[in-house]
């Protein structure tokens, strides 16, 4: 980046918010994947006006901007290309409003998701989306990637909670989309289009989020099965009884063994699957639902069932699930975390196909994830220093995608396309679908300034 | 339209599905508004391939296509321009699949919404969106306009139930968006963008809809208030108790009087407002919620409260609400039905402003609608043969829009922009927002073939 451009950027944000040294730039070269790209410059703007000025400068000078929050993404969506500008939104981290009567919050993109959870819960409100990285990741990143999480089965994903956005367009205009009402059909749903657009159609500078009343009661159950098919039919049985649990987490045999080897919690090493089920709502409702849940578990060959109502007991049941990510990397240092998603009735078939794929390539392939919405997380465990193993992993990933699509599913349930799934997008969207998306990108970002090279090549 | 084009269209769909006579074309010249436009030709295609062929022909020959379902829209969205082709999707009316395990239905656009309700409820499932025209309107139109309805407060709008679409693009490609899973972040959310795009970005030929389990129990309450403010604070009080009722309908004093004069149900003519409240779910949950609802009503100066649990009693309580549309046109023959929406905390202020607007112009202006999501329906009652009154009504509508926007609301909660709200779109979306929308339209529909002149002029 030429000196004049750097000088102009410094005059916009103040030189203390422009990082130039290699050691500082390296800090913004990665996300939660193995992809790397050291940006030419890092800038931390403080408000929408500064963001807009830099975007206009990028259009004028022709340099690319790579927006990012906390960099916890799992698809390479925020990894910069070299010579580009990394734009970090973490300074814009104010919670501007929490309204109990209008059930909404207005926040800046740099607010950490877990901090928002705590702030709204203090007011008796609830923001359901709960990506695993919630103690670190930011709302801006959640919106840009349309993040999910365990509670999505009952409560939906981030998109279902975004009422309105303030956005800097790729040409540097500040626009407002949506608003403060749940119902809004005034023109195209730009709020929905921008949510999940991975920073390619605009930079989000303010977000109005829908909230719901905080559930008054929660109950948790942990059910152990000999066969994953029985866990899957429990899910179906619950739905047929009219129950949509708040979370419904599945762990397969390999995952259970990894966790048990790591933590010695007393999990049964011969179990085929574990379901972790949580219901929430008003007290009588929760009691009624839990009865139906237990009933569904027992009638579907569950071999052991533990329930918990107080916070300490619940935490004990969650311990195994929370330990999964740490436990599985004890086997191999590199974890390729996928999020291929299938219609829930196809879970047993998908688990079977994943098992075959693991065996075919001789790879460790634990499977866990969100059974209610078919959003499994097959994780391939490898050592990235071993090129033969990495090549096998790449082939296995392709077969996972093929399997998900064969079963009527999708490449990505909650991680996004970014860099990692770009080569496979056409398998799902088709040539016509990609052309439609590219037409939109080219129309609103004619100089290809915002996060170029992500999702697809224009 | 030249003879050669008509001949080609006949060869695509069969001549029995092309309507040429004036009396047939007049039948497709209107929707639920006072706008009219007699199309040059009417075509009723039978499948997506036929739709695509006609769209390609339109691109080649340069004629506009105006897609429509049952024509119940309230914004002029489906009214053709003269010399255009009205494309009626009502022949494509098959329910292709209802899956209890995957909680979804696959349907063609011409399926009448009420028919879908009955079909899925027979399977123990539930499709919540319930626009008032549900016995006539079609799912395709609901998706194109992103229809709402009374149940939206708890359950959300049509967009919240669209998982995937098959769409004919404005250049005549058949593409598929989304899929069969709730979680899907593979590329841009074209499903969301197309939902509510009012037929300007694609013609919907197949829809995959998310369903939920059918609630096992329902209870209804009717609460009478002296003042509309007390009805509004009841809404707030319920939310603060953690209750989101399935429906929460408000009628103001003028509406109550219209209904009572028409039906003699024994409604109190001096009441300031009536709330019709419905809760649904599992039996214990419904009982618990209704107790909290009654509590909220009583603590907010409700002067009379009736409740109902069985179907006959519930129907009796709903009678007044259902009669509103018919009752109010007894005063004047022309009804201008608006759907300006405000954040729910602003309902008392909005009702007050609407009252002043009615008085200022000497117009009958009953207000009713969906109090839970601030989606009021101010209705202006006039006689369209009286030009002076019509001019006053136009000015009143403008003031209603200004009031909604002043209070942080939106021009349209569930009717869409179409032709009627086009002059006011910029008030809400701003010049930058409209430019962004237009860029998308121009990019995907370069020859401006699909529903031109709706939402905005490109």
Image (cartoon, coloured by chain):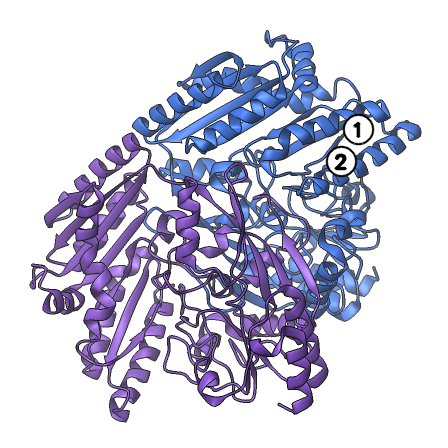
Chain colours: A blue, B purple
Depth check: A353 or A426 in front?
A353
What residue is shown at x 62% (from left), y 49% (from top)? B179
Q: Quadrant of the N terminus of chain B?
A: bottom right
A23 sits left or right of A374 in the view: right
Residue position marked by numbered label 2 in the rendering: A400
Q: Quadrant of the C terminus of chain B?
A: bottom right
Chain on which label 2 sits: A
Q: Are marks 2 and 1 on the same chain?
A: yes
Q: Earlier in the sequence, mark 2 or mark 1?
A: 1
Depth check: A41 or A30 in front?
A30
Depth check: A335 or A203 in front?
A335
In terms of image quadrants, where is residue B237?
A: top left
A281, above or below A438, in the image: above
Q: Position of residue B360 (x, y in %)?
A: 20, 81
Label 2 crowding class (10 Å Cα cut-off): few <14, some 14-19, many 20+? many
A244, above or below B5, in the image: above
Q: Position of residue B137 (x, y in %)?
A: 41, 65
Quote the CA–CA distance across marks 2 and 1: 8 Å
Q: Which mark is residue A80?
A: none
In terms of image quadrants, where is residue B45?
A: bottom right
């Amino acid at each position: 980046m030429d000196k004049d451009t750097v000088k102009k950027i410094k005059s916009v944000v103040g030189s203390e918010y422009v990082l130039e040294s290699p050691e500082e730039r390296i800090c913004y070269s990665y996300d939660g994947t193995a992809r790397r790209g050291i940006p030419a410059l890092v800038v931390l703007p403080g408000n929408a006006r500064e963001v807009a000025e830099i975007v206009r400068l990028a259009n004028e000078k022709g340099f690319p901007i790579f927006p990012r929050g906390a960099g916890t993404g799992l698809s390479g969506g925020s990894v910069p290309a070299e010579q580009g500008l990394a734009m970090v939104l973490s300074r814009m981290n104010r919670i501007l409003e929490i309204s109990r009567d209008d059930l909404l919050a207005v926040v800046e993109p740099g607010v950490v998701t877990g901090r928002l959870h705590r702030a709204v819960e203090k007011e008796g409100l609830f923001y359901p989306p709960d990506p695993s990285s919630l103690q670190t990741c930011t709302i801006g990143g959640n919106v840009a990637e349309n993040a999910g999480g365990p509670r999505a089965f009952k409560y939906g994903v981030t998109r279902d909670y975004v009422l309105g956005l303030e956005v800097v367009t790729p040409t540097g205009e500040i626009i407002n989309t949506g608003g403060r009402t749940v119902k809004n059909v005034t023109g195209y749903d730009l709020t929905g289009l921008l949510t999940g657009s991975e920073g390619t159609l605009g930079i989000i500078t303010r977000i109005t989020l829908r909230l719901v009343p905080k559930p008054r009661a929660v109950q948790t159950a942990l059910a152990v099965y000999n066969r994953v098919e029985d866990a899957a039919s429990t899910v179906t049985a619950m739905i047929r009884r009219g129950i949509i649990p708040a979370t419904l987490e599945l762990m397969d045999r390999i995952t259970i063994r990894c966790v048990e080897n790591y933590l010695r919690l007393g999990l049964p090493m011969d179990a085929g699957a574990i379901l972790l089920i949580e219901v929430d709502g008003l007290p009588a409702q929760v009691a009624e639902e839990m009865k139906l849940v237990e009933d569904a578990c027992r009638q579907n060959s569950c071999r052991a069932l533990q329930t918990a109502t107080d916070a300490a007991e619940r935490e004990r049941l969650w311990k195994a699930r929370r330990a999964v990510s740490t436990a599985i990397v004890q086997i191999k240092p590199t974890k390729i975390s996928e999020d291929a998603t299938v219609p829930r009735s196809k879970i047993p078939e998908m688990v079977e196909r994943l098992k075959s794929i693991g065996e075919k390539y001789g790879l460790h392939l634990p499977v866990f994830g969100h059974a209610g919405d078919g959003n499994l997380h097959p994780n391939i465990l490898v050592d990235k220093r071993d090129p033969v193993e990495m090549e096998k992993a790449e082939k296995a990933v392709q077969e996972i995608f093929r399997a998900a699509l064969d079963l009527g599913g999708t490449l990505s349930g909650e991680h996004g396309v970014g860099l990692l799934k770009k080569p496979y997008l056409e398998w799902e969207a088709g040539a016509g679908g990609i052309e439609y998306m590219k037409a939109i990108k080219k129309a609103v970002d004619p100089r290809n300034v915002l996060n170029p090279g992500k999702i697809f090549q224009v």
